[in-house]
Image (cartoon, grey):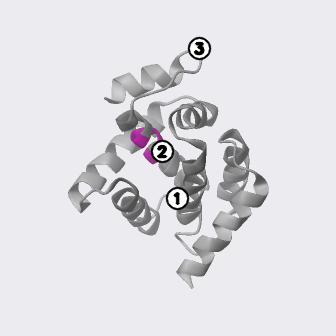
Amino acid sequence: MIADLLRALTAPTPQAIPADDAHLALAALLVRIARADGEYDAREVARIDAVLQARFDLDAEAALAMRREAEQVEAEAPDTVRFTRAIKESVPYEDREGVIEALWEIVLADGVRDHEEDALLRLVAPMLGVSDQDSAHARRRIEARRG
């Protein structure tokens, strides 16, 4: 599955990818956001696992396995534009704001709105077709849940 996703991400033209690959692409994007500030700590890892469990209805073991695959994909994959293109082609518009919420969960997992993570998310949201305003609403929803 990793090899298929990497091939799709490096294809010269956009193409829709199967749902399982789209899930892995999203997981890899979560990892990329978490690593954007040069730190990838236990709180971010735990939050990624929790997001994967909730979003894809996985048990803890399956979420852990998906995150580990995602870490490998993220390390080997090309630029972030390819991730967002794969997700945009595979995730219906109405579900993309949920993707942005998941990304904000990771950015805010360590309690710090780091500049590098924030900047990457501001780049990613429009690539997914989500406005800055909708991204800000998603961020506020996550902040409200975190208390």
Q: Earlier in the sequence, mark 1 or mark 2?
A: 2
Left or right: 121 in relation to 147: right
Question: Residue placed at 21% from the left, 57% from the top?
Answer: 61
Q: Secondary structure at mark 2?
A: helix
- The mark found on residue 26 in the picture is 2
Does 26 lie within the magenta span? yes
Residue 47 appears at what percent x and percent y? 43, 65
> Height in image: 59 above or below 29?
below
Q: Over which residues does the magenta segment extend?
A: 23-27
Q: Residue at x 53, y 62 (%)?
A: 106
Label 1 neighbour load within 10 Å: few <14, some 14-19, many 20+: many
Coordinates of residue 128 in the picture (x, y in percent):
65, 42
Amino acid at the residue labelled 2: Leu
- Label 2 environment density (alpha carbons within 10 Å; few <14, some 14–19, many ≥20): many
Residue at 52% from the left image edge and 45% from the top image edge: 29
Q: Is the C-beta separation of discs 1 and 2 under 8 Å?
A: yes
Instruction: Say which quarter of the image contains residue 4.
Output: top left
The Cα–Cα distance between marks 1 and 2, rounded to whole angstroms, is: 9 Å
> Badge 3: how crowded within 10 Å, few (<14), some, or many (20+)?
few
The kind of secondary structure element at disc 3 is loop
Question: Residue 145, how many percent across, how many down?
Answer: 54, 79
Task: Kindly identify which numbered label has been placed on residue 102.
Answer: 1
Task: Answer with left or right where residue 65 lies relative to residue 22.
Answer: left
As for residue 75 lying within the magenta part, the answer is: no
Residue with the mark numbered 3? 12
What is the three-letter code of the residue carrying label 3?
Answer: Pro
Mark 3 in CB contact with mark 1 (< 8 angstroms): no
Mark 3 or mark 1: whose residue is earlier in sequence: 3
Q: Looking at the picture, how far across and down is residue 1, in whole percent?
A: 31, 29
